[in-house]
Amino acid sequence: MTDANGVRWVAGVDGCPAGWVVAIVNADDPGDARCEVCFTFEDVLNLDAAPVIVAVDMPIGVPDVAIKGGRICDNETRSRLGGRQSSVFAVPSRAALAETDYGRACAVNLEHSDPPRKVSKQCFGLFAKMREVDSLMTPDLQDRVYEVHPELAFWALNGCTPLDLPKKVKSSPDPDGLDLRKSLLVAAGFSKTDLEFAKWSKRLVGPDDIIDAFAVAWTARRLLRGEEITLPADPPRDGRGLRMEINA
């Protein structure tokens, strides 16, 4: 689908304190891009730009029984990231995801995991956004909406080599790590000005959120062209028929 000017748009989506930050990118010209903030994931799907591919850094497909390290795609992604592997959380069981209390989520996941495991607090902090995406996803919608991961995108941008600098240090953005990621995106054709765009307060959208949104927009362009790397190559499906995969 193209807009009135014949442009095909793709979207890279990352969660942020305000909701979701979206990098909307011309599929044929990464220098033609803009950022928007959506309060809900439903708003992302209904953007006026009507992106033909939406790449989102949030799990799609949730297992009934969680295994060590999360889903197969979580483990395969983590194995490629070297020192950045801690950025990939283990996705819990679907029953645990339904819980809004941390203690209950841990107790339920212990009953629905093999071997029994609790839920990390970092992962539990994403539960609301995970449920938001999960409530809208269908197998048919996966023809347009794909799970991605920014650090896997940077791994691919860096010649399938893990980055040697973190994005954050002690929960604060690391300038050197962000500059490294910006340089990879600029080399791929993105505008440095877009990557440093600061329309919103950092309390609403962090600089790392914007960088990550553009990184997964890069993956969205690859998905549109059929150039993506999918982990695992033959993804399993969850109980609702959703593919459990991560793309780069």
Image (spheres, rainbow, N blue to C red):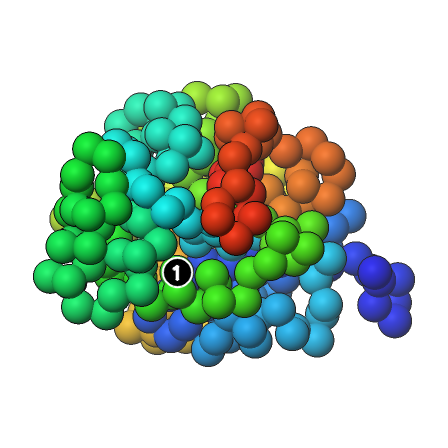
Three-letter amino acid code of the residue under disc 1 = Met
Between residue 144 and residue 71, name the one nearer to us: 71
Which residue matches tag 1? 130
Residue 89, image x and y in percent?
A: 29, 43
Left or right for 52, reference 55: right
Q: Say above or below: 152 vs 119.
A: above
Q: In which quadrant will I find the C terminus?
A: top right
Residue 225, image x and y in percent?
A: 75, 38
Kindly indicate the quadrant of the structure image that contains residue 103.
Answer: bottom left
Secondary structure beneath dot 1 equals: helix
Left or right for 121, reference 192: left
Q: Residues within 10 Å of mark 1 (few under 14, many from 20)?
A: many
Is residue 185 something one can see in this rendering?
Answer: no
Q: Residue drawn 71% across and 70% down?
A: 49
Q: Residue drawn 73% across and 57% down?
A: 52
Left or right for 119, reference 79: left
Q: Residue drawn 17% across and 68% down?
A: 101
Q: Residue drawn 29% across and 73% down?
A: 203
Left or right for 14, reference 188: left
Kindly indicate the quadrant of the structure image that contains residue 234.
Answer: top right
